[in-house]
Image (tube, grey):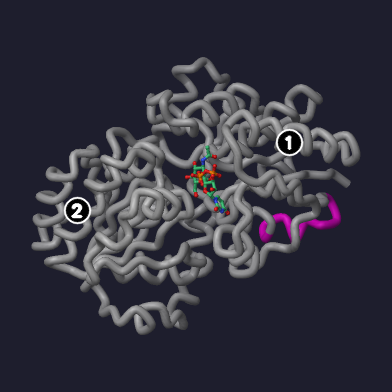
Amino acid sequence: MKKIISVVGARPNFMKIGPLHRAFLPHSDMVMHMICHTGQHFDENMSRIFFEELELPQPDFYLGVGSGSHAEQTARIMTGFEKVLMDEKPDLVVVPGDVNSTMAASLVASKMGIPIAHIEAGLRSFDRTMPEEINRMVTDVLAEYLFVSEPSGLANLRKEGIPEEKTYPVGNIMIDSLTHYLPKTEKSTILKNLELRTRDYVLVTFHRPNNVDLEIKLTELVNFLNRLSESKKVIFPVHPRTRINLEQYGLISKLESRVILTEPMGYIDFLTLTRHARLVITDSGGIQEETTWLGVPCITVRDNTERPVTVDQGTNVLAGTDLNRVQKLAGNMLEGKTKKGKIPEYWDGKTANRIVQILLRKL
Ligand code: UD1
């Protein structure tokens, strides 16, 4: 019997480990799959609701690290996870994505000689001011199995000298969650609750420090959303980081009534809103991919993307952070001047099975 511990911490990790857990279940005679939740995200609607909706079991280990500076958070995860590994001595640690929990767990496992599998390996924004870029680079150097979601990932790893036999193009595991839960969106009442009609609203999310931490940037964002709401209703589920800053800078009351702020949403409601949106405007990583799969137009308000396949093949437009430019682009797209995208290779809902087959063979 092999023991595998998957590490999750922040919201975007949960939809990546759900499918993996499901794919391991039929092999429970060979593999014991355990989940360690670091507690990087801890709010009800940033964490617990995802465990419920994605049918994840209670985590086997909960580290309860909470928020803090990067060093504090990383250090707390490392100390807590080291104890777990000392007690459990697993045969493999699985880390998805690029959050602090991903990198912290990888550092600990590698120093204890435990092999690491990185899901979503090889993505690069080439922007080291993003904490995620550091997390991605460190994790990929340490990992033994690098599961790659899109062509750029393979090319990047090759350039960095990672041996080819460690890399596996398996597709995008987040799309496994999307395809599995899409039928459930039929039952969601979120459009009705928010009084929305299909293709008649713009869905926006912003949480990157670059866009929301500085008062001047956040004020510009509020003005932009107000202008945008003149043509379409704007739905804005607000990440805790963004909420704290909006409140601190006294900006909540500056928003027009057609900009509808909500709490962070659960997986099914958010998927429902994405699926029926006329346009999505975001600075998230994963939402670029979900819109591409769904064929929904997306504008990414960043200077770079670590997911270029969404631009090369999908519906995503990388707009930069000049909101006047974004405004013009959004206007054009609302008038129907959108890109016709296609779904990238292996984004077929079967990525977790591919990963499990490879791991069963290799372990
Ligand atoms: C983290 C990830 C980011 C990912 C994002 C998705 C890192 C470096 N960043 O950013 O890549 O896109 O998650 O959400 O790992 N907070 C709460 N409740 C929570 C979680 C956070 O109130 O459940 C607040 C805290 O005040 C905290 C702030 O949000 O200081 C930011 O949380 P943190 O985990 O540090 O980073 P995120 O911005 O969420």
Give the number of the disc on residue 223.
2
Residue 96: quarter of image = top right
Instruction: Name the residue type under label 2.
Output: Asn
Where is residue 137? Give x, y as percent.
Answer: 53, 25
At 25% from the left and 54% from the top, the residue drawn is: 222
Instruction: Name the residue type under label 1.
Output: Lys
Pick whichever, 194 or 349, lies toward us.
194
Pick whichever, 27 or 253, lies toward us.
253
Which residue is labeled 1 in the image? 362
| Image: magenta residue range | 22-30
Where is residue 351? Give x, y as percent.
Answer: 55, 51
Pick whichever, 269 or 194, lies toward us.
194
Q: In screen coordinates, is 222 left or right of 80?
A: left
Cβ of mark 1 under 8 A from ligand 1: no
At 40% from the left and 71% from the top, the residue drawn is: 272
Which of labels 2 and 1 is toward the front? 2
